Amino acid sequence: MSSWKDNIRKVTPYTPGEQPKISDVIKLNTNECPYPPSPLVTEMIEKMDTERFRLYPDPEASLLVNELAEYYNVKPEQVFVGVGSDDVLGMAFLTCFNSEKPILFPDITYSFYDVWAELFKIPYKTVALDEQFKINPLDFNKENGGIIFPNPNAPTAIEMPLEQVEEVIKNNPDVVVIVDEAYVDFGGHTALSLIDKYDNLLVVRTFSKSRAMAGMRIGYAFGSKELIDAIKAVKFSYNSYTMNQATIETGVAAIKDDTYFKNTVSKIIETRENAKKELKKLGFSFTDSKTNFIFATHERMPAKEIFEKLKKKNIFVRYFNKPGIDNYLRITIGTDEEMKKLYKALQVILQK
């Protein structure tokens, strides 16, 4: 007799960074913002009309879409929003990658890409980074069913120059090219200016990093009207009401407080640049980060050993037990106070 288990889809799920269940920890492992959201977000929550929660939210999330369109100087029909950038990217995979040809993405990159490809049964091939962990745009000049890469890349923190990004898009006009810009606000150069030039380009962003709203799950994307309409059609065929009312309204509030947003980003960048100096003194080397984290390796002590010893001190950083990066740590930029505690702990660990 056949078992019902034979008909179950079997996948290896994405493994997120550890979420400690204890208090009094320094959490530098999931690239969250170390500062709270804008005070306007708090004000919005306090005055929110909860009576409306009994009603379904606007499936178009028009308030948020219009606010994003105005802020980024694009048309509302060029904007798509979802429950975090993972939701947006998942919908984009479902919509855009339906060729029998393999999609392409870097071999060292955001580790959700291969999970989605396996889940949706999308053929894929990875493109090797060079010895400096950089993406070579020429490596994407091959037959494919679509392309996706983060810029800056994760976990390497390296930015691909915008002219190289455009080279990839220009050389692949027959497929959709997705540029995942989760970290672009921390010093990168966005491809947003190219969406009117290339109708096959999708630029994806998130509120989780620079806007300090990972817990509210807001992601968004920019593209041509035709491309956005296609993604919307897939989304509305799956679940029309994915974004709740509270998320929509707090997302609008966050966008409106541009001064707070820019000050937050500026503080993180300043702390990151100082962290490069402090970590270098301790014997670390790293890529030139354009993100809110540093991808570092130590001259003497293995990354796994440092990771485990920091964890015993309730300091969490990210360790990837994967070929090519298994001697690197991804260290999220925290507050200045948190980073000072990290440096002090590393001094003790490395002396031993």
Image: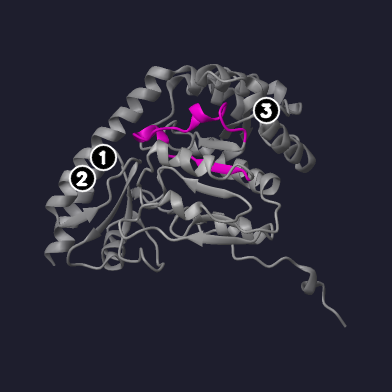
Q: Residue at x 41, y 48 (%)?
A: 153
Distance from disc 1 to disc 2, alpha carbons, whole Å, reads 6 Å
Provide the secondary structure element on which disc 2 rests.
Answer: helix
Residue closest to the far bottom = 1
Are the residues flagged by discs 1 and 3 in contact, CB closer than 8 Å?
no
Q: CA distance from mark 3 to mark 2?
A: 41 Å
Which quadrant would the C terminus be assigned to in this image?
bottom left
Which span of residues is magenta-colored? 175-199
Q: Nearer the viewer, mark 3 or mark 2?
A: 3
Circle 1 — which element? helix
Reply above or below: 218 against 15. Answer: above
Q: In the rendering, at what x and y percent does residue 224 appear? A: 63, 29
What mark, if any, has residue 287 been given in the picture?
Answer: none
- Residue identifier under label 3: 225
Tell whether label 2 touches label 1 (CB within 8 Å): yes
Callout 1: 10 Å neighbours few (<14), some, many (20+)? Answer: many
Q: Is residue 181 visible?
A: no
In the rendered image of this protein, does residue 110 appear above or below residue 224? Answer: below
Task: Name the N-terminal-most of marks 3 and 2.
Answer: 3
Image colouring? one colour
Location of residue 146 in the rendering, given as x and y in whole percent from the top left corner: 61, 50
Left or right of 346? Residue 88 is right
Q: What is the residue that sits farthest to the right in this orientation?
A: 1
Q: Amino acid at mark 1?
A: Arg
Is residue 267 within the magenta segment?
no
Q: Dot 1 corresponds to which residue?
A: 272
Task: Say what secondary structure mark 3 lies in.
Answer: helix
Quadrant of the image for the N terminus?
bottom right
Q: Residue at x 43, y 37 (%)?
A: 209
Residue wearing tag 2: 276
x, y percentage for residue 329?
31, 58
